[in-house]
Amino acid sequence: MASPSVSSKASFDSAQGYYDATRRVALGPAPSLEGQRRADVCVIGGGITGCSTALHLAERGYSVVLLEAADIGHGASGRSGGQILPGLGTSMATFEQALGKQAARDVWEMSREAVALTERLIERYKIPCDYRKGYVHAANKRRHVNESKAWIADMAAGYDYHQLEWLDRQALQQHVVTDAYAGGVLDHDAGALHPLNYTLGLAAAAQRAGTAIHCGNRVTAIEHQPDGRMRVIANRGMVDADYVVQATNAYGEGLVSSADAHIMPVDNYIVATSPLTPEQVASVLPTQVAVSDARFVLDYYRLSADHRLLFGGQVSYSGHQPMLLDWRIRQRIRYLFPQLRSPAIDYRWGGRLAITMNRAPDFGRKGNGLYWAQGYSGHGMAFAGLAGKLVAESIAGQAERFDLFGSVKHRAFPGGKHMRTPLLVLATSFYKLRDLL
């Protein structure tokens, strides 16, 4: 990998940036698939969903082939902020309205299971991904304070969740040294990790369990065969399988039309500063918690294992890098932490995730053999791992938990393929304006 740019000129690109430069997990051979193969299950996509699905199926004794168009962790799984959070990308009220109160409680408990599963997989497979507990949801304005306190009360009373601690402005300063926030919520169960090393760790575990991983194989079609099996056609080969799992999230357009309509690709951007000194760490994030704020277009940040400030935010729905992106992120860092005096930026990178209209994940299946799990809406680092486990359960004949999420109704984004992006940009402009009020 080329040396990172340290100038003020923006150099965001599709590379994993800092994460790629600090990978610590080596995979076994993952050559491009040539010719034709037969397997019980073909998994499309080498992110957390795909690797977890492959791992859990292989451990159950299924023969599994995983096809990845680029490299393992190429998408959001290897480029995100690395947040490991209970909950999902929407409030629990969304699930209460869609499924009822008791089923919503089951959803919440599964989101907690997703965090516990992440921790268990890290420990079991000794994945060196720098996992650290502690996460703050910061309140930017007075209305966020009231909303945060109501959230704490609702989660305790309705979901028996008591890991949320309110921090007033003074208490918050013990964790996040800035005057920008009115307070915050410390979630003792949440945390963050190195996303690429975690994803690579899952892939390596799946290989050891017997999964055949092939990189550089972009899937172009899924065909249903007369004998009931499916054929997955890639650019250099094909796989015949009883079951197919589409785990491509924002990268699978055109494979399953019924899944395509439910998600919108979104680009997000992160920078990594030069390593901070111990004095700077103490002056910014003394307890080294991860942080996100309460705005619609939010900031999220944390310290890396080598004490760089990893700072993410901004958003693009168009597929094009926003104007003045480098300057915007620098301005946010200066606003929050003027004491850093504009630290040098060593790495810049972008990543693509998928959102749904209601920000709940979209699980589905077509017939008895084609599955998908997608649309985590920024909450996929933990939950995608559980999604893979639920897909494996369903293929093995225990579909109740997968089908619970599959029963959540999803609307297509308005405007169709060509107008949905400008309409979403227009709607986002409203929420950006609301962030300022």
Image: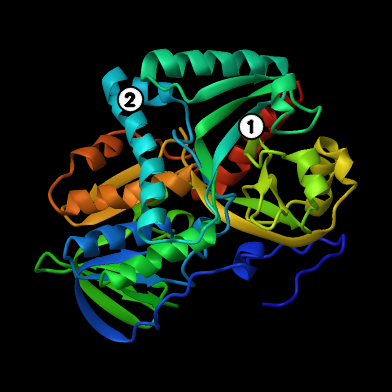
Q: Which mark is residue 117?
A: none
Q: Earlier in the sequence, mark 2 or mark 1?
A: 2
Can you say whether 63 is above or below 373 in the image?
A: below
Disc 2 is placed on an element classified as helix
Left or right of residue 316, residue 93 in this image: left
Does residue 375 appear in the picture of this structure?
Answer: no
Q: Residue at x 67, y 15 (%)?
A: 143
Label 1: which residue?
Answer: 296
Can you say whether 7 is above or below 92 in the image?
A: below
Left or right of residue 4, residue 55 in this image: left
Furthest-left residue in this view: 227
Can you say whether 127 is above or below 160 in the image?
A: below
Q: Answer with the quarter of the image where residue 375 lies.
A: top left
Q: Nearest to the eye among marks 2 and 1: give it.
A: 2
Q: Residue at x 84, y 50 (%)?
A: 327
Neighbor class of circle 2 (other Cα within 10 Å; few <14, some 14-19, many 20+) is many
The picture places residue 125, in percent across and down from the top left corner, at 37, 61
Q: Quadrant of the C terminus?
A: top right
The picture places residue 408, in percent across and down from the top left corner, at 32, 33
Disc 1 is placed on an element classified as loop
- Name the amino acid, label 2: Ala
Neighbor class of circle 1 (other Cα within 10 Å; few <14, some 14-19, many 20+) is few
Distance from label 2 to label 1 (Cα)? Answer: 23 Å
- Name the amino acid, label 1: Phe
The reply to whether callout 2 and callout 1 are in contact (CB within 8 Å) is no
Q: Which mark is residue 104?
A: 2
Q: Residue at x 66, y 77 (%)?
A: 1
Colour mapping:
rainbow
